[in-house]
Image (cartoon, rainbow, N blue to C red):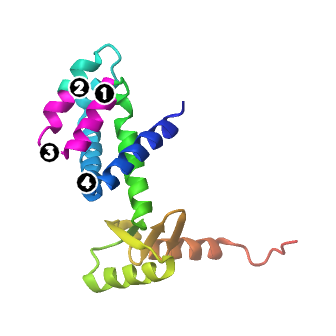
Amino acid sequence: MRVTLLAKRYAQALFELALEGNILENVSKDMILVEEVIDENKELRLLLNNPVIDAHKKTRVLDKIFAGKLEELSLKFILLIARKGREKYIPYISKAFNSIYKEHKNIVDVTFTTAYKSDKEVKDGVLKTLEKITNKNIELQELIDDELIGGYIVNLEDYQYDASVKTQLKRMRKEFSKNLFIKKY
């Protein structure tokens, strides 16, 4: 079974339980936390991916790390996955869960990259414009890349709108480098 399919099935089951229990927001935060903890902790990742270490030890480690920090449903779910020997898929399940959650809440991720920290007016304007265009709630992540010189780049799902000075200069350089005296057929 492919990892993505497996992750989606587990994530969908958790999503339905959280929705039924009216704790969807909390479980979503839990899955973000679980994903971050595993991504940031190399030793934990190695432990979860190690086939030599038995599932009982992995379950105890996960319980010690997350007990008291997660909703009861989230903790039981993660421990169940570990007991079933599928603990290495927990990060994928977390990502899949949050993807399902965002789809349910009509949220789309947008990356807004500028050369410098933009003020609140600019961010609010971008948010309003994108919400109007997409008819979705926007979750804006702002990045700073001083190589852009000026302007901005907006990444929305599979689309990229590049209005940076860096890109405009590249286009101008390309146009000026063309030999205008040679005919093109």
Q: In whole angstroms, how far apart are the C-alphas of marks 4 and 3?
A: 10 Å
Q: Residue 82 bears which disc, if any?
A: 1
Residue 106 image point, x, y percent:
43, 68
Q: In whole angstroms, how far apart are the C-alphas of marks 3 and 2?
A: 15 Å
63 w.r.t. 135: above or below: above
Image quadrant where one finds the C terminus: bottom right
- Marks 1 and 3 close (CB-CB < 8 Å): no
- Kindly identify the amino acid type of the residue bearing the numbered disc 1: Ala
Which comes before the other along the chain, label 4 or label 1?
Answer: 4
**Residue on which the image places disc 3:** 69
- Kindly identify the amino acid type of the residue bearing the numbered disc 2: Thr
Residue at image position (42%, 62%) is 104
- Tell me where the magenta segment starts and ends, as one range: 61-83
- Marks 1 and 2 close (CB-CB < 8 Å): yes
**Residue on which the image places disc 4:** 29
Q: Is residue 124 magenta?
A: no
Q: Residues within 10 Å of mark 1 (few under 14, many from 20)?
A: many
- Kindly identify the amino acid type of the residue bearing the numbered disc 3: Lys
Between residues 123 and 48, which one lies in front from this camera angle?
Answer: 48
- Kindly identify the amino acid type of the residue bearing the numbered disc 4: Lys
Which comes before the other along the chain, label 1 or label 2?
Answer: 2
For this orientation, the residue located farthest to the front is 20
Q: Is residue 110 left or right of residue 184?
A: left
For this orientation, the residue located farthest to the right is 185
Residue 3 image point, x, y percent:
49, 35
